[in-house]
Structures are given as C-alpha cells and as structure tokens.
Image (cartoon, grey):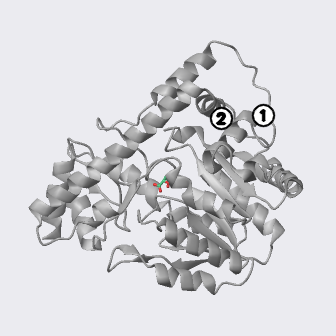
Amino acid sequence: MFEHVPGYAGDPIFHLNEMFHKDPRQQKVNLTIGLYYDDDGQIPVLNTVQRAEQQLAASTRPRAYLPIEGDHAYRQRVQAMVFGENHPVVKQGRVATIQSVGGTGALKVGGEFLHDAYPDSQLWMSDPAWENHHDIFRGCGIPTHSYPYYDPTTRALDFNRMVASIRSLPPKSIVLLHACCHNPTGVDPTPEQWQTLITVMKEGDLIPFFDMAYQGFGSGMDEDAFAVRAAADAGLSFLVANSFSKNLSLYSERCGGLSVVCATAEEADRVLGQLMAVVRRTYSTPPSHGGVVTARVLSDPDLYRDWQGEVAEMRNRILQMRERVHSLLAQRVPDYDASHFVNQVGMFSYTGFSTQVIQRLRNDHGVYVLDSGRISVPGLNSRNVEYFCDAVAASLR
Ligand code: LMR
C-alpha cells in the first residue's frame, strides 16, 4: 500500500541536534537547535514556572476540554504582551487571538486561515529563512518565495533590496517578517527601517505576518514588540504568531498565540470564528497544562515581575557570550572580523563560516553548527566558550 511513499529527508535542525547527542566525544559543543541553556549547560525550569506549578498543584483541576480558541485569561495576556497593556487595538476589541500549539501551530493556523480568505495570495519570506517556514506555508497550499534580506558581504541587512522587493509585490501578497531576533541571521531592521517597511506594506495593500518567537531575547519585552506595535499604530491589518517556548523555557508544552489585527471589533469576531474553524478541523482544542501555567505567570503581578527579571537574565547571558566570543576571537585570529557576533541580536548568530570550516568544527572538534553557519549562542557558556573559540581559530586557518 505504501510502497511509493518516500522516506523523510529529516529536519536539518533536529537531525543535527540528534547527531550531536549521538557523538561519543567528551568535549563537544551543541550550537544547533534554538534552545536556551544556562551557564551550566542546562535548560532552565524558570523559578516563576515552578512557583506557578506549585500553586496549581494545590488544587485539583478537572480536565474538561478548553474552548476551541483556548483559555480566556491566556488569550488576554497574550494580547497584553504582544501589543502592550493598553494598546487601542486591544481596547477596541480589534484583535482576534487564539491559544496556539506553539509558535509553529500559530503559523499553521494563520496560513490555513489566509489561504481560505485569499486563495490566490502567495507568500514572501526573508532569504535566508527559518528552515521550517517554507514547509509550513506550502503545507497550507500557499506558494512561497523569498525577498532579499541578508547581505553576506557585510553580514548585515540588505535593506534597500529588501524594500524594493517588497514594494514590487502584488496587492494582498503575504509578507512574512521576524518581529525581532531574526532566525537564522540575528539581523533585525532598525525602528526607522520598520517604519519604512510598514509604510510600504500599507501602500502596497500587503498582508504582514509577523513571527515573534523570541520576544524578550533581543532588547526587552516591549522593545522587541516594536514592529508589531508600530504596524498596529499605523492601522494595518495583519497577523502575529508568538511563542512562549523560549521566553518561558516551555518548549515541550507548545504554548503560543496567534493574533489577527482587524479593522473593527465586528470583523475580529468573524475572523476569530474562522480561526476556530481551522483549529476544530485540525486538533479540535488546545492542550491545557502549559497554557494554565503560562496564564498564571502572566496574570499574577509578582510572578510577572519576577519573570521579566528571568527573561532579562537569559538575554544578558546571551549578550555576555556574544562579547566573549568577539574578544576571544579578536585575540586568537586578529585578522578575522568578528564584529557580527556583537552586532547581531537574539538567540542566533549567522557566522558566515564556509562549508569547510563548518565540517572541520564538527569533525575535528565536536562543535556542531548548522550547515547554514547559524549558531545558537546560548549553547555557549563560561566553560566551553574558550574551547569554541580555539576550535574556530584552528578551523579558520
Ligand atoms: C530553531 O530554529 O532552532 C528553533 O526555532 C527550534 C525549531 O523548532 O527549529
């Protein structure tokens, strides 16, 4: 029956992560998947998450189905976090938000919704993109293309070409954007550049879709939401997928949100209905445990304040590692320009290492970097950062 079914080529990120774990060498460094590790190399269980779980464990909760759109408090807190507590679009009821199965689930539901609403629309994403973006949207039946984004010669944003490309798109094209901490490059537009992009998208009658998986890992919770809030201020209708995998360290709980900003509250109500229709035919209703924990941390003022501190701690450790790599490489390979390690932001750095360097790092030193040259910076810590820089120095020679 299934003789014709091809094998799965495998996911490039998960596959390399598995290869790392199978590598028997003692001295090895995992810079593959976007997981935040603390300075001891552990995936933290945040203190605020532990406290929320302890509070919840004190009472027994029957496990009835959640509503199709998810938990009410969760959805409200998602809106406050993404748009800001008192943003007019939230106050006017113009945002349709569902609790989603991680950020990926939000992209999928958003993609299906858009394909139903605009069956002829095609989607453009940055070049390079997160490995999974093309597959998610093609899986929704939406043809995908790329716009220029990253200039490998400057290791920075190719803004003029990006804007020119987006400006040339047909009306109602979908433009996928990383709201902050671009994956894989770590290169973000400046606030001024975002304003230009927002104007171009408004004039071109385009449909922005923001993927915000790393809120808090760039400059701060509010700072990282700049693009989304500026688009809302400008009166655009658009989508935002957000995730709690990273900033609450709740990867396997699959907690995310999808928000669609609409022109009126009445429109938002209809859009919410269509999002619910997609959810109902896909997985019916969201799972509850991670959502209840998330809603508790985001709703309780003490937990929320302490959580902001924990996010800042994770963000600062990433910054420290970036600075460490920059200064260590400056000492070890003086003719190598390592400034991109400090200029890029968020979880990822796009190293620009050649295929040969990437192979040497992996084969000779047990340092696992994605084939694209992306590294997940929190895989570095005070015990392995010198080893990493020694390995880079040796591999660059
Ligand atoms: C990554 O890019 O490594 C993360 O977003 C994890 C994933 O699902 O790929």
Q: Is residue 2 among the parts visible in the rendering? A: no
Q: Amino acid at mark 2?
A: Gly
Give SS at disc 1.
loop
Residue 186 % position (x, y) = 41, 62
The image quadrant that residue 325 belongs to is bottom left
Relative horizontal placement of residue 1, taking residue 48 as reference (left or right): right
Q: Which residue appears at 61% of the width and 29% of the height?
A: 293
Q: Which residue appears at 34% of the width and 38% of the height?
A: 38
Residue 184 % position (x, y) = 44, 63
Q: Which residue appears at 75% of the width and 77% of the height?
A: 172
Q: Height in image: 126 above or below 49? A: below
Residue 66 circle label: 1
Q: Amino acid at mark 1?
A: Leu
Label 1 CA crowd tier, 10 Å (few <14, some 14–19, many 20+): some
Q: Height in image: 285 above or below 288? A: below
Relative horizontal placement of residue 207, taking residue 15 as reference (left or right): right
Give SS at disc 2.
helix
Question: In this orientation, which residue lies closer to the viewer: 47 or 303?
Answer: 303
Q: Are marks 2 and 1 in contact (CB under 8 Å)?
A: yes
Mark closer to the chain start, 2 or 1:
1
The image quadrant that residue 170 belongs to is bottom right
Question: In this orientation, which residue lies closer to the viewer: 127 or 212?
Answer: 212
What separation in Å lies between label 2 and label 1 (alpha carbons)? Answer: 10 Å
Residue 291 circle label: 2
